[in-house]
Amino acid sequence: MLPVFVPQGNAEMIALVRNITAQLDLDWTVFRVPHLNNGSADLSVAAGLLGLEYKGTMELSRASLIRWVMEEIKKGDWIKGAPAVGNY
């Protein structure tokens, strides 16, 4: 739907991801977020590939996103990956 409703934004995101992923010496993670809200930092975050097994919702609290990013920096589970993230 993005190419239809926001073609310029979609083109920019594709170019951004292509440039980042081309960097062989860079540990990168590109994550996709749903609707951001002001919920609690204590909410669990699901990170995974979209599909039947993805457990995240279309909502994500900003505070839990920051917590997830900080944990991901330490763990590195999604280095060179592109998960969708959302609260359970």
Image: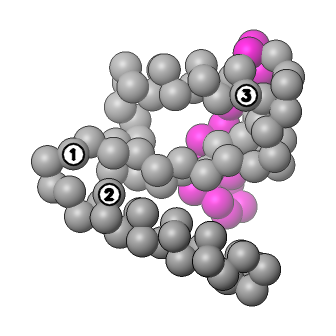
- Which callout, 1 or 3, points at the residue further toward the start of the chain? 1
Q: Residues within 10 Å of mark 3 (few under 14, many from 20)?
A: some
Residue type of the residue flagged with mark 1: Leu
Residue at horizontal 32 percent and vertical 57 percent from the top: 20
Left or right of 25, for residue 77: right
In what element is the residue under mark 3? helix
Q: Which residue is mark 3?
A: 62
Q: Residue furthest left?
A: 25
Q: Are marks 2 and 3 in contact (CB under 8 Å)?
A: no
Residue at mark 2 to residue at mark 3: CA–CA distance: 24 Å
Q: Which residues are magenta?
A: 41-54
Using the image, tell me which numbered label, if any, was put on residue 68: none
Residue 2 screen position, x and y as percent? 71, 76
Residue at mark 1 to residue at mark 3: CA–CA distance: 25 Å
Q: Which residue is mark 1?
A: 26
**Quadrant hosting residue 59:** top right
Q: Are marks 2 and 1 in contact (CB under 8 Å)?
A: yes
Residue at horizontal 78 percent and vertical 80 percent from the top: 5
Camera sees residue 44: no
Q: Which residue is mark 2?
A: 20
Vertical comparison of 67 with 62: above or below: above
Q: Residues within 10 Å of mark 1 (few under 14, many from 20)?
A: few
Does the magenta run of residues contain 46? Answer: yes
Residue 58 screen position, x and y as percent? 82, 49
Does the magenta run of residues contain 53? Answer: yes
Camera sees residue 64: yes
